[in-house]
Image (spheres, rainbow, N blue to C red):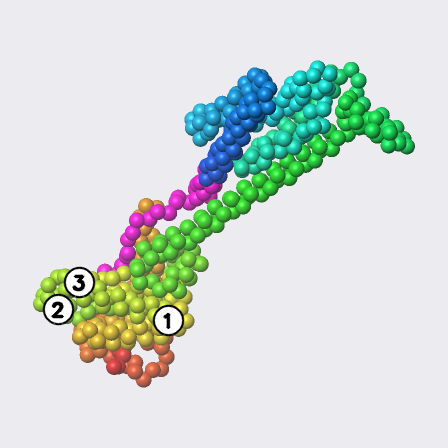
């Protein structure tokens, strides 16, 4: 019997020190993908809006009997085409970080230009400044709203500032071309109703204070929306981190199952997940239980191989459940037997008691299936842990305690007892009437004679 047992498996763990970088890169990639989807939706909404505006303008002009303004049609057509091109390149090798800023800036400046160049009337004596009073800055709110869909707080803030700068540029251009301007400052103190009517209803009224109010509120709103998008990005990243934690927990469960076998109890698996150091190579005092089926070779010779495997699998599955019910861990199956440990890799209260009860239950289960098993129990230092390379590792237990348990199991064939114990194990149980000494014996493979104990049935 070898003094080392192991269960091997492929190992998918990332190299130390790289996991955090890889996770951050993965989160960034998913955030960028989400931004691209949102930007596509924003540009799509913007393009459809412009296209509808173009159709509405053309049809409205014909319905009203006016000839459509060719310049407006050209501008709206250019904006529609710009949106289509932008949609086509998002996420491709032709995409550039500045393209979305360019598109939104052109859109905003284009709308502002309409307030400068689109005549309110065919009459030449109607001041263009009335466009700022008849319509207003709220026509530019959809651009900031659509920018929010991109999940780019910078684009939202940029759009807000572009609106303010474009709006003021258009206003100052129009106001600067007027021969006469009237504003709130012309009211003076103690103004009467007639004074208000004279100033506010004048076609030359430019309302500088109104421009400060509307652009101020617009900029504050845009910055609040930018902050909301920034927080939304944080929520998105937090969700990704939560998904990664759930995935890490699932991977940990799979790793433990692969390392220790399918029959690790859920409670044991949870403890191992919560204690990442449990599988780190270490030496701990514990119990080794080795079980083997007596006469299994003869049993196998009399039956078809398929039947033998079926019977053996059923028995070992139930045996592993017995071990788990007593807080033990099945390290490996050894042909027609198994090796289990108590108090390593997990701590167990009164490990000798747990191992003894498990051994008795194993004997009972075997007898219910017309088997007879031999069990060796040894107590002492056990080297255990996950060892190997990054690509392949094994959870192993080895040392003199493992060797003694194996020799005791083999020695059981010389006695009429199913369960043999070493001195340290018997001492850990205390004074028990069912534990009897079989005297000092020479055990093959050990340099010194050892006192052997047995459990009376």
Residue under the point 45% across and 49% down: 243
Observer-nearest residue: 71 or 386? Answer: 71
If the image is split into quadrants, where does the N terminus sit?
Answer: bottom left
Residue numbers of the magenta segment = 1-29
Residue 320 on the magenta segment = no
Residue 336 badge: none
x then y, percent, for residue 77: 52, 21
Circle 2 SS class:
helix
The Cα atoms of the two marked residues, 2 and 3, are separated by 11 Å
Residue 351 badge: 1
Which numbered disc, 1 or 3, marks the residue closer to the eye? 3
Residue under the point 61% across and 30% down: 159
Residue under the point 18% across and 64% down: 310
Label 1 environment density (alpha carbons within 10 Å; few <14, some 14–19, many ≥20): many
Q: Which badge, 2 or 3, comes first in the chain's sequence?
A: 2
Residue 309 badge: 3
If the image is split into quadrants, where does the C terminus sit?
Answer: bottom left
């Amino acid at each position: 019997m070898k003094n080392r047992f192991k269960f091997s498996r492929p190992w998918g763990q990332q190299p130390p020190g790289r996991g955090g970088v890889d996770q951050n890169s993965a989160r960034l990639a998913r955030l960028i993908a989400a931004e691209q989807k949102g930007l596509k939706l924003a540009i799509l909404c913007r393009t459809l809006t412009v296209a509808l505006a173009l159709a509405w303008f053309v049809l409205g002009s014909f319905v009203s009997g006016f000839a459509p303004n060719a310049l407006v049609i050209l501008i709206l057509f250019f904006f529609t085409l710009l949106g289509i091109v932008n949609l086509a390149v998002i996420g491709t090798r032709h995409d550039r970080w500045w393209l979305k800023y360019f598109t939104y800036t052109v859109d905003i400046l284009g709308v502002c230009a309409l307030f400068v160049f689109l005549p309110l009337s065919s009459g030449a004596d109607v001041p263009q400044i009335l466009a700022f009073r008849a319509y207003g800055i709220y026509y530019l709110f959809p651009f900031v709203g659509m920018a929010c869909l991109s999940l780019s707080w910078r684009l939202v803030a940029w759009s807000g500032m572009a609106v303010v700068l474009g709006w003021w540029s258009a206003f100052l251009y129009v106001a600067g071309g007027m021969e006469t301007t009237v504003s709130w400052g012309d009211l003076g103190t103690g103004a009467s109703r007639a004074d208000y009517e004279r100033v506010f209803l004048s076609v030359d009224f430019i309302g500088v204070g109104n421009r400060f109010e509307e652009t101020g509120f617009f900029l504050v709103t845009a910055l609040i929306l930018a902050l909301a998008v920034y927080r939304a990005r944080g929520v998105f990243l937090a969700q990704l981190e939560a998904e990664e934690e759930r995935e890490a927990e699932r991977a940990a469960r799979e790793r433990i199952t692969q390392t220790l076998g399918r029959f690790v109890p859920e409670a044991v698996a949870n403890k191992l997940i919560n204690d990442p150091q449990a599988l780190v190579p270490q030496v701990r005092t514990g119990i080794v239980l080795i079980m083997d089926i007596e006469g299994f070779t003869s049993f196998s010779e009399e039956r078809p191989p398929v039947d033998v495997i079926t019977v053996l699998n059923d028995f070992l599955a139930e045996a592993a459940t017995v071990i788990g019910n007593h807080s033990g861990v099945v390290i490996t199956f050894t042909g027609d037997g198994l090796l289990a440990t108590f108090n390593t890799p997990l701590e167990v209260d009164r490990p000798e008691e747990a191992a003894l009860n498990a051994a008795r239950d194993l004997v009972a289960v075997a007898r219910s299936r017309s088997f007879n098993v031999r069990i060796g129990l040894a107590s002492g230092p056990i080297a255990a842990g996950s060892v190997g390379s990054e690509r392949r590792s094994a959870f192993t237990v080895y040392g003199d305690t493992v060797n003694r348990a194996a020799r005791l199991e083999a020695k059981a064939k010389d006695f009429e007892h199913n369960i043999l114990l070493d001195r340290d194990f018997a001492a850990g149980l205390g004074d028990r009437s069912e534990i009897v000494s079989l005297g000092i014996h020479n055990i093959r493979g050990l340099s010194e004679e050892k006192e052997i104990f047995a459990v009376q049935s």
